[in-house]
Amino acid sequence: MDFNKFEKIFDDYVNRYIEKAKEENNEAKILNLTNKKIHSYKVRDNILKIASLENLKVNMFIVEFIGLFHDIGRFYQYDKYETFNDSKSEDHAKLSIKVLEDEGIIKLIDYEDRPYVVDAILMHNKKDLPKDLDRKMYLYSALIRDADKLDGFRTITVYERENKNLAYFKNKSDEPTISDEIYNNIISHKSVCKDNLETILECQITTVGYITSDINFNATLKLVKENNYVDKMFEMIQETERSKNIYNFVNTYIENRLSSANKK
Ligand SMILES: [Fe+2]
């Protein structure tokens, strides 16, 4: 299937919000919506890369669709609430499904593929995946989560801490601290809840922590390594005792996992 048609649908929809933000002269909104549009395309590229590197038997059209449209609800969310924080607004994954339905986009997907699209998108922002997914459902859901996180690593390397318009750092303190809870979760491979972060450093380190808690495919880790994301992220992160420990912990994890994959 020709994906250009879907890119056009996506662009037309998100550009409406970006144009509206320009009319409102809302610099923060323009920036955050534009970043989200870039993120959507990067995640689309990532998900295709991971699926082909892993040689997965999946429908590549569905993979590409989930990649590009997983965050389509973000535009309405930011327009209405001026935040990407789901706990202060609405679950953006549910909003994405609502947009796909309201705009008649989901109808363009074959009927039997729709549950995969809907469920993979609904689960992409949940803390963990349910354990009992069937193989196909698992693959689509795991792919979008990895592709999304991979772009999360890129964004840290390009976001400037000083930019007060960035939703990512909004209302976060500049204190160089990582709470005991967050630190202990990260070094025990547990995912950290994004809702209770207080410092910029905690936001950054929580994203880094996805590498050791929540990456499903070795291909994703290979891409982390190839792009040198760990070093690039830590260039942007304030150095503290705890951040240094996490840096070593993450690098060791990547090396161990990739070298045991090579032995197989
Ligand atoms: Fe998302």
Image (cartoon, grey):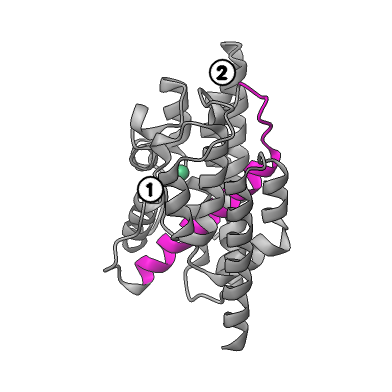
Q: Position of residue 30 (x, y in %)?
A: 60, 23
Relative depth, front residue between 240 and 123: 240
Q: Is residue 165 above or below residue 180?
A: above
Please tell me which residue is depicted at 57% across the width and 42% down the height of the picture: 204
Locate the N terminus by quadrant. Answer: bottom right
- Give the magenta part as a residue range: 136-164
Among the 4 quarters of the image, the one containing residue 228: bottom right
Report whether 131 appears left or right of 203.
left
Q: Nearer the viewer, residue 206 or 69?
A: 206
Which secondary structure, mark 2?
helix
- Position of residue 77 measured from the top left corner of the image (x, y, whole percent): 42, 28
Kindly state the secondary structure of the residue where label 1 is placed.
helix
Q: Which x, y percent locates residue 97?
A: 35, 43
Residue most toward the top? 24
The answer to whether any part of residue 89 appears in the image is: no
- Is residue 21 rendered to the left or right of residue 229? left
Residue located 64% across and 51% down the image? 244
Percent x, y of residue 186: 47, 54
Q: Which image quarter is the C terminus in?
A: bottom right
**Disc ID at residue 106:** 1
The reply to whether the magenta stretch includes residue 153 is yes
Magenta segment, principal secondary structure? helix
Amino acid bearing label 2: Ala
Dot 2 alpha-carbon crowd within 10 angstroms: few under 14, some 14 to 19, many 20 or more: some
Neighbours of disc 1 within 10 Å: few (<14), some (14-19), many (20+): some
Disc 2 within 8 angstroms of ligand 1 (CB): no
Q: Foreground: 145 or 114?
A: 145
Spot the residue most to the bottom.
Answer: 264
* Pick the front one: 19 or 153: 153
Which residue was labeled with disc 2?
21
Return the residue found at the far left.
Answer: 132
